[in-house]
Image: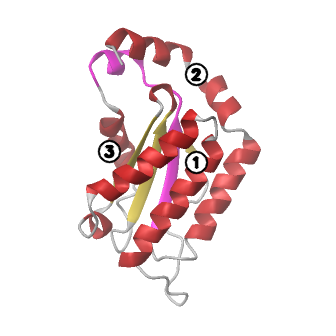
Amino acid sequence: MGKGTRLWRHIVTDHHSLRRTFDAAGMARIEQAIAESEKTHGGQVVFAVESALPLARVHHGITPRDRALEVFGLLRVWDTEHNNGVLIYLLLADHDVEIVADRGIADSESDALWHAICADVEKACAQGRYVDGVADGIRASAAVIARRFAYDASAARNELPDKPVVL
């Protein structure tokens, strides 16, 4: 996508667009998907969605990946006892999904696996199935996390909120 096209998408994609795409019922479904997934693994999943970036940031070439890394830090997804946090970030204006896994998980998994999950979520979003796509991405991420951090009911604690974050 050209720079002008990207700028235009960030101009026209606002919080109203986000609220139409992710209404209260959809956000509740995503929150439930996170809570349910965390009963299958010992990690922490956070979903964050942002309608658009400030135009100056778009003009300076901030990528969705750059922003996802910022959000990972801002939301303190890295701040879990076992370094097992995973951020699923959606930048609506760019139709881009990024997953950032903390070092406890990232070290044991290939980037290709995370990219494949992102591509599946993006495909569902392109079909207008945003909530379903995100929920499927959460479940797919949970399967990856479970390979490194098995669920242990005696040690289970929710270190990060399950509620989706709207930036």
Residues 152 and 122: in front is 122
Q: Is residue 167 visible?
A: no
The answer to whether residue 45 is magenta is: yes
Residue drawn 54% across the image and 63% down it: 139
Q: CA distance from mark 1 to mark 2?
A: 21 Å
Report the residue marked by disc 1.
133
Vertical relation: 158 (above or below) 129: below
Vertical relation: 161 (above or below) 92: below
Residue drawn 32% across the image and 61% down it: 102
Could you tell me the amino acid type at mark 2?
Asp
The answer to whether residue 63 is magenta is: no
Residues 132 and 33: in front is 132
Q: Residues within 10 Å of mark 3 (few under 14, many from 20)?
A: some
* Quarter containing the N terminus: top left
Q: Estimate the x, y position of residue 91 in percent, counting from the top left.
A: 47, 34
Could you tell me the amino acid type at mark 3?
Leu
Report the residue marked by disc 2.
14
- The mark lying in front, picked from 1 and 2, is 1
Could you tell me which secondary element the residue under label 2 belongs to?
A: loop
**Left-right relation of 41 to 58:** right
Report the residue marked by disc 3.
69
Of label 3 and label 1, which has the lower sequence position? Answer: 3
**CB atoms at circles 3 and 2 under 8 Å apart?**
no
Could you tell me which secondary element the residue under label 1 belongs to?
A: helix
Looking at the rendering, the stretch of residues picked out in magenta corresponds to 44-61
